[in-house]
Amino acid sequence: MAARPTWQGHLKLSLVTCPVALYTATSSASHVSFHLINPDTNNRIRMVPTDPDTGPVERSDLVKGYEVSKDEYVLFDDADFDKVKLESTRTIDINQFVDEDDIDRLYWDDPFYVVPETGVGAEAFAVIRDAMKAAGKIAIGCLVLRGRERQIALEVRGKGLVAYSLRPHDEVRDTADYFDDIPAVKPDKDMVEIATRIIGQKEAEFDPSKFTDRYDDALREMIKAKQKGGKGLVEAPEPDDTNVIDLMEALRASLKGSAGGKAPAKKTAAKKAAPAKKPAAKSKAA
């Protein structure tokens, strides 16, 4: 396998244990990334660790510090971290099983592929995998990953397992802090009915292969243009806010546009361009 494992250890279900490796299931290699360049010299800038008193220092000579008060730190070196040994450092211990719907989607985080090491451990892995598949449950365990102990959820995927790191409860903000101030509005039934029909017209199968990052695409086009000596600038104006007064007309135009595959009629835009009258205050309040 070409990719290097992110983590290596053991998967444990009661007395059944097998060696496994975790590989990141996603990649950001296709993202457009930049380096800092000095435009006067065209040299790439290097970030050099620097002590304000003594100047540049070697990164390998540095230790980590935890700030306990203003400008006061408790220092940790590699030997100190080695003293903090947890069973989950090298073992994914499955301690419970839950239904997938029981896990709020806010808690799902990074996915990893769980692959058994070749050898005698492959049979033990198959036993755990097939038992999970028969139970139809999501396994919950924990492991130390990138210096932190994380709860993970494991599910069967083909011949392997997929592990998702789960966000801790204190990292997920309470929806009430954001949604309680949303005003209680009873929308017009006809508008809801039209919007529901628009949703029905736009139903489709989930196809992530069609997802593209248009911002990255625009950057790549600009890079090509700059390589050729052109400007390559494309303006993308932000869409106008919905005019509440014309909301019903906009919904009807959207419904017609969805059915015929054409853009909404231009008369709506003409109406919007007309001078605002007294109802505009009502629009702002809505």
Image: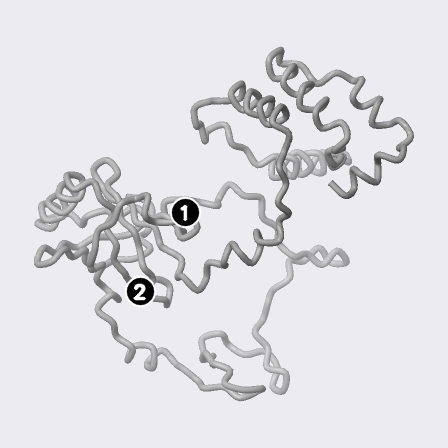
| Circle 2: element type | strand
> In the depicted view, which residue is nearer to us: 119 or 238?
238
- Give the residue at mark 2: 144
Residue shown at the point (58%, 86%) measured from the top left: 70
Residue shown at the point (29%, 77%) measured from the top left: 84
Q: Is residue 14 left or right of residue 176?
A: left
Q: How many marks?
A: 2
- Measured as percent of width and height from the top left, residue 92 is found at 22, 59
The answer to whether any part of residue 234 appears in the image is no
- Mark whose residue sits in front, 1 or 2: 1
- Measured as percent of width and height from the top left, residue 193 is found at 57, 23
Q: Is residue 160 left or right of residue 247?
A: left
- Give the residue at mark 1: 105
| Circle 1: element type | helix
**Mark 1 or mark 2, earlier in chain:** 1
Q: Is residue 30 above or below residue 166?
A: above
CA separation in Å, label 1 and label 2: 22 Å
Which image quadrant is residue 25 in?
A: top left
Q: Is residue 12 left or right of residue 166?
A: left
The answer to whether any part of residue 131 appears in the image is yes
Which image quadrant is residue 263 in?
A: top right
